[in-house]
Image (spheres, rainbow, N blue to C red):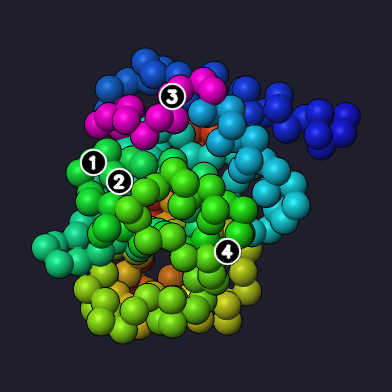
Amino acid sequence: MSVSTLLPRIARLATVMRKPGSGDASDRPLTQASGASEPGRGIANASLFLKQWASNPLRMGSVVPSSPALCGRIARLTRADEGEIVVELGAGTGVVSRALLAQGLAPERLTVVEIESEMAQHLRRKLPGACVVTGDAFDLPRLIPENLHGRVGTVICGIPLVLLPLERQRRFVQAVEAVAPGRGFLLYTYCITSPLPYRQLGLSATREAWTPLNLPPASVWHYRAA
């Protein structure tokens, strides 16, 4: 079966698995306003996501976008005091971004970094008012204006860091620390145990959430300087 034939089928499966009401209340997001439960939008988002995955699977953390349950968990773990922004790395089709906005984050306080230009264009259309930057997360100190360094409340990462060599992981940690000193970052991943060798990276690690209804089941880890 060709990739072009397979993609719509997986997209429809992902949408069906995300229908509201599946799972217990503790695993549901606070709101469905992100739109991930709308069949048309869900299929379109998944199709775009799958297209990008097929072109470069090592850059994508999953074959389908994150579920509303996972997005809601991430949104509830996100913190930003007055005057601070939230930075999302590897936003894909924006399902986590929309959950953050539905949770009450003002669009102008959300900065999204997406390396894939087609995804970034999609995000600019879907996230009016948010700052969407096309770029590499490893260039974070350059991509985030200097006046916002130290004013980042939470960094959210959807990049598959587990696939990177240790030196690249270390560079990522340094990039985050440069703009959000002492805050660390949230990483959502499909590893049950820590996907990062956090002790070697000088980090502490806490698994903040586990979402078995995601496809595949996902964890949210919080890493920060030890």
Look at label 4 and name its amino acid: Ile
Look at 77% across and 30% down and name the residue there. Answer: 6
Look at label 2 and name its amino acid: Leu
Q: Are marks 4 and 3 in contact (CB under 8 Å)?
A: no
Mark number displayed over residue 103:
1
Look at 71% across and 24% down and name the residue there. Answer: 9
* Residue that label 3 marks: 37
Specify whether residue 154 is painted magenta. no
Q: Position of residue 101 (x, y in %)?
A: 28, 44
| The residue stretch that appears in magenta | 27-40
Look at 32% across and 20% down and name the residue there. Answer: 24
Q: Secondary structure at mark 4?
A: loop
Identify whether 129 is placed above or below 48. below
Query: Disc 2 and disc 1: Cα gap in Å?
Result: 5 Å
Look at label 3 and name its amino acid: Ser
> Callout 3: few (<14), some (14-19), or many (20+) C-alpha neighbours within 10 Å?
some
Query: Disc 2 and disc 3: Cα gap in Å?
Result: 16 Å
Task: Farthest residue to the left: give it.
Answer: 82
